[in-house]
């Protein structure tokens, strides 16, 4: 019996978000996330990129705020695409990566500002979404 068949019997189907083609194309042409988020505020990827930029600049509070928005935008997108509060959100599906990065960024920033309990809840959510995501995000250098 295949692993995919077992997974389908034991839990919900994986959620795969739709591609953000306009966002990807604009980023590829060098437009900044800060410019783009005004046109695409629903993009978890853009909010995650803003969070990562703030983190790199040492602004933990701004990184937290951007990641929080990206996380909530991602939850909205998951729900619109059939997610019911649980189930895989695979990292290898590129459109899911914005949400997973925002989630990772939120956990990191929450830990840095000393928020009790949130980093552990986020870590659990990230691992339940895709246990390979954290390692993949770290390999991106974030």
Image (cartoon, rainbow, N blue to C red):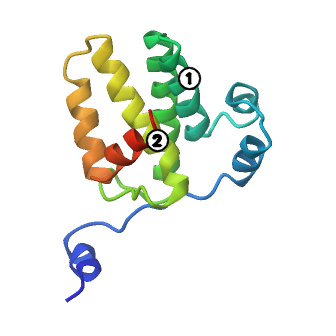
**Could you tell me if residue 31 is visible in this image?**
yes
Where's residue 54, x and y in %?
A: 53, 17
Identify the residue at horizontal 57%, vertical 40% (top origin).
45
Residue in front for this viewpoint, 98 or 137: 137
Q: Tell me the SS state at disc 2.
A: loop
Where's residue 14, x and y in %?
A: 38, 65
Earlier-in-chain disc, 2 versus 1: 1
State the quadrant of the N terminus.
Answer: bottom left
Instruction: Examine the image and state in which quarter residue 88 appears.
Output: bottom left
State the quadrant of the C terminus.
Answer: top left
The residue labelled by disc 2 is 140
Instruction: Examine the image and state in which quarter residue 10 appears.
Output: bottom left
Left or right: 99, with 104 as reference point: right
The residue labelled by disc 1 is 53
Number of residues whose C-alpha sits closer than 10 Å to that of mark 2, classed few (under 14), some (14–19) or many (20 or more): few
* In this view, 54 is above or below 20: above
Instruction: Examine the image and state in which quarter residue 64 appears.
Output: top left
Residue in front for this viewpoint, 86 or 98: 98
Disc tally is 2
CA distance for labels 2 and 1: 13 Å
Where's residue 106, x and y in %?
A: 39, 27
Q: Which mark is residue 86?
A: none
Where's residue 31, x and y in %?
A: 78, 34
Identify the residue at horizontal 22%, vertical 41% (top origin).
124
Left or right: 59, with 18 as reference point: left
Identify the residue at horizontal 51%, vertical 13% (top origin).
62
Left or right: 65, with 18 as reference point: left
* In this view, 69 is above or below 115: below
Identify the residue at horizontal 66%, vertical 51% (top origin).
20
């Amino acid at each position: 019996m295949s692993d995919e068949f077992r997974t389908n019997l034991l839990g919900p189907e994986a959620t795969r978000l739709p591609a953000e083609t306009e966002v990807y194309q604009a980023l590829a042409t060098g437009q900044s996330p800060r410019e783009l988020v005004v046109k695409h505020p629903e993009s978890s990827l853009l909010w995650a990129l803003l969070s990562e930029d703030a983190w790199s600049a040492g602004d933990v509070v701004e990184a937290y705020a951007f990641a929080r928005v990206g996380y909530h935008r991602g939850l909205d997108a998951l729900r619109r695409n059939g997610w019911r509060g649980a189930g895989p959100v695979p990292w290898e599906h590129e459109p899911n990566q914005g949400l997973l990065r925002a989630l990772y960024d939120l956990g990191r920033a929450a830990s840095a500002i000393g928020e009790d309990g949130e980093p552990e809840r986020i870590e659990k959510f990230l691992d339940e979404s895709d246990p390979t995501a954290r390692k993949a995000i770290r390999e991106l250098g974030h």
